[in-house]
Image (cartoon, rainbow, N blue to C red):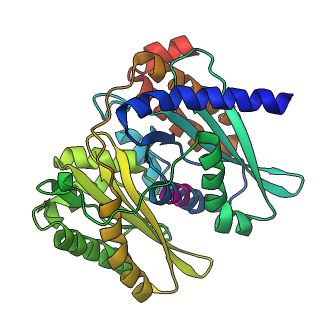
Amino acid sequence: MPRLIRFLVTLGFVFIALFPRLLLARPLTLSLSPVLDHNVLNDPAELVLLRNAILAELSETYECVVLTRSNGIPLFEEQRRLALASLDPQTFPYPPAADFLLIPELSKKSGTVVLGINYTAITGRKNSKVLRHELTFGSVSELIETAADRTVRELEDLLSLQKRPVASTIPQMLEGKEWAVLPWLDLGRDDGIATDSSERLTDLSAELLARELPKAKMLSEANVEEASLSYYAGATEQVAAAVGHELGVDYLLTGNVTTASSELWLNLFIVRAQDALVLAAREIRAKDMEEAVDTLEFAIPAMLQSIPSIPVLEESPAAKNLEEARILWELARRLGKELWARNQALDLILAARMVAQDTYGELGALH
């Protein structure tokens, strides 16, 4: 009986979230938070890689688009104070509407690693229930290798995700727009400074974009580098879009690279600056830089072809904003009790402030 009740509740959530989308014939919009970690992974870069892998699987396989309310956590200590001092929860004039809130959460249980998928339809109802589905892994290495694939397959069932059709042409809406390629970030550097590999990937990305979009306007490298000083290793697409706002561009391509499991791991994203929506994402694993470069030459055209023709997201109703802010706020309070998780708690508090859009007044009422 409890399973039946849970199934019916989930079905109701999905119907409530999907009904407006069916009327508008648009992809499902998912608000995906950074992965919360209860002292499972020793390397904070692995948390970034895990979220990026989930995001890429969702974007490449399913009819959905992804955004976040979070700015992310700088991976390197010297960047954290600067980033926190410069954060503005009202970077955007409004919080874009999303259909579901997804919060991955890592913990340990009986010698295994557990990835909890916390999820809820954003309906605007007070005291909406956050459901949870758990995936179990025998080790951290198994988690890193298989978590993204297993997570999205579970989300396909939980949220009734539809497979994305294969596209062969680049949408006309991208032509004539202004683009910027943000400097690729090397997550393996202790100081976050660009390396020869990340600089090579940045230059190649700009060349490929210019080749695929001959009518688009590409912002100069000098202008992009100056504005990108606030873009740090560990930053989400929310921060990338804020840089895009400062540059005055329509779209951004951004990426990061690191070494994991004796391979090069690349993550790249196409972000719309106006609403911080991730329109396309890919994960590339390669044995060396030459293989990575060869794969990238096919990946960027494929990403451009896969971009859905989705209008700029409208402002989310106030009731939905407060509902999502309340969930983020409550998670932040729970995490804040654990000393090692306070950076994550602070990130969630800032995310709640962003989505509530007013900071202390409304969040004080929630508290």
Dominant secondary structure, magenta: helix
Q: Answer above or below: position of 188 versus 338.
A: below
Q: Work out which quarter of the rendered image holds the N terminus and state it.
A: top right
Residues shaded magenta: 51-57
* Left or right for 41, reference 361: right
Q: Residue at x 62, y 61 (%)?
A: 149
Residue 76 seen in the current view: no
Question: Is residue 130 rendered magenta in the image?
Answer: no
Measured from the top left, where is residue 225 in percent x and y? 22, 62
Q: Residue at x 65, y 34 (%)?
A: 336
Viewer-side residue, 125 vs 192: 125
Viewer-side residue, 334 vs 214: 214
Viewer-side residue, 189 vs 203: 203
* Left or right for 167, reference 3: left
Q: Residue at x 43, y 27 (%)?
A: 20
* Left or right for 180, reference 300: left
Measured from the top left, where is residue 13 in percent x and y? 60, 28
Q: Residue at x 20, y 70 (%)?
A: 212
* Left or right for 320, reference 330: left
Q: Answer above or below: position of 98 versus 136.
A: above
Residue 79 seen in the current view: yes
Q: Answer above or below: position of 145 versus 2.
A: below
Measured from the top left, where is residue 357 in percent x and y? 38, 23
Quadrant of the rendered image containing residue 367:
top right
Measured from the top left, where is residue 135 in percent x and y? 75, 52
